[in-house]
Amino acid sequence: MANIEERLRLLEDKEEIRELLLEYGRALDGRDTKAYSELFAADGEWSGGIGQASTPAGIKKMLDDLFANATGKFPKAHHIMANFDIDLDGDTATARSRWMWVAGDGEGKPKVVRAGFYEDSLVRENGRWKFRKRRAVTELGQ
């Protein structure tokens, strides 16, 4: 059995990773591309339905371009994150989680636009957990 310090470190790491997963959704929903891109490691990669990008600068540009072409679309969209499964191995980790993207329909009622899961590789970089690779898989929706 691990000692108390090791167990505490494990809990703190898992909590920081959970916060990273949630901050991703908050930054994306707020269209804060700078904050979003800073969640990725220097060699970070993102792939999913909107494309692929590498490095925080490349990921920021991908989102800036996406939002520039989506003016007025889904102004009150929200990501709902759930089912976090986190495995730690020192300064690296993997995570799998579920997501739903909810937006208002024509009458202002909530509508699930897309849903799926994330597969993540994470790394502790400069003392903070970051995404090394984030893959978004859409199971429902476009």
Image (spheres, rainbow, N blue to C red):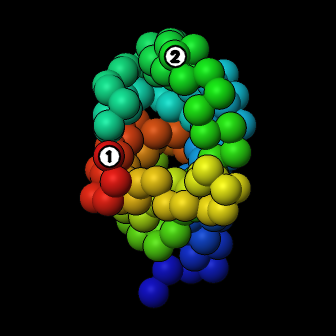
Q: Earlier in the sequence, mark 2 or mark 1?
A: 2
Vertical placement of residue 100 versus 43, above or below: below
Q: Is residue 72 left or right of residue 42?
A: right
Foreground pick, 66 / 91 = 66
Inter-mark Cα distance, 2 to 1: 17 Å
Residue 130, horizontal then vertical, whole percent: 52, 39
Vertical placement of residue 141 versus 84, above or below: above
Foreground pick, 60 / 70 = 70
For the N terminus, the quadrant is: bottom left
Residue 132, horizontal then vertical, whole percent: 40, 36
Examine the image and state in which quarter residue 16 appears.
bottom right
> Which residue lies at the image location 47% right of the left edge and 73% below the top edge?
83
Label 2 neighbour load within 10 Å: few <14, some 14-19, many 20+: few
Residue 74, horizontal then vertical, whole percent: 61, 39
Which element type, helix, strand or loop, lies under badge 2?
loop
Which numbered disc covers residue 36? Answer: none
Vertical placement of residue 84 versus 50, above or below: below
What number of labels is visible? 2
Residue 134, horizontal then vertical, whole percent: 38, 41
Q: Is residue 131 left or right of residue 24?
A: left
Could you tell me the amino acid type at mark 2? Asn
Q: Is residue 122 left or right of residue 31?
A: left
> Which residue lies at the image location 57% right of the left edge and 14% below the top edge?
68
Residue receiving disc 1:
142
Q: Is residue 19 visible?
A: no
Q: Which residue is most to the bottom?
A: 1
Could you tell me the amino acid type at mark 1? Gln
Which element type, helix, strand or loop, lies under badge 1?
loop
Foreground pick, 6 / 57 = 57
> Which residue lies at the image location 59% right of the left edge and 44% below the top edge?
24
Residue receiving disc 2:
69
Label 1 neighbour load within 10 Å: few <14, some 14-19, many 20+: few
